[in-house]
Image: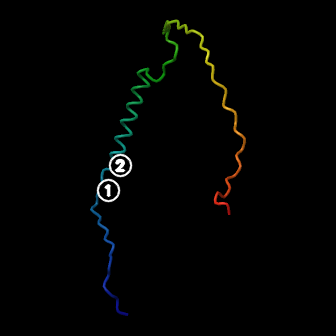
Amino acid sequence: MDEGPVERETVVVNSGSRGGGGAIVAIVVVLVLAVLAFLFFGGYLGRTGDKGVNVNVDLPQVNLPPIHIDNPAPPQQQPAQQPATNQSGK
């Protein structure tokens, strides 16, 4: 059994380090937790809606005259036309 030349060969390179993807994810998670803790303990997330804020807005009075529109009656439908006949007389 004679084997021919190898077209493709899988090469696994093991350099010993796994990269910094896990460290980046950990830093992002810590930052998000820090921001949420700041908002929660600072009182920004636990506020109730009633803090004695009262807003009165006076709107202008708008008076419009009554509007009456007379639309014309729709046109009467024409009776159905007869189908066209052969004009050559044959």
Q: Which residue is mark 1?
A: 18
Quarter occupied by residue 85? bottom right
Name the spot of residue 71 as percent of width and height, x first: 63, 23
Residue 20 image offset from top left, x and y in percent = 30, 50
Secondary structure under tag 2 reads: helix
* Quadrant of the drawing holding the C terminus: bottom right
Q: On the image, numbered disc 2 is attached to which residue?
A: 22
Asked whether 32 or 85 is in front, the reply is: 85
From the viewer's perspective, tell me whether residue 76 is left or right of residue 29: right
Between the C-alphas of marks 1 and 2, the distance is 9 Å
Quarter of the image with the N terminus is bottom left
- Residue drawn at 39 percent across, 26 percent down: 38
The foreground one among 77 and 87 is 87
From the top left corner, tell me how far across and down residue 17 is, in percent. 29, 57
Q: Which mark is residue 50?
A: none
Residue at the spot x=59%, y=14% of the render? 67
Q: Count neighbours of disc 1 (C-alpha within 10 A) and say few if under 14, some if 14 to 19, many if 20 or more.
A: few
Q: Is residue 37 above or below residue 47?
A: below
- Three-letter code for the amino acid on which mark 2 is drawn: Gly
Using the image as rendered, state which of residue 84 and residue 29 is in the foreground: 84
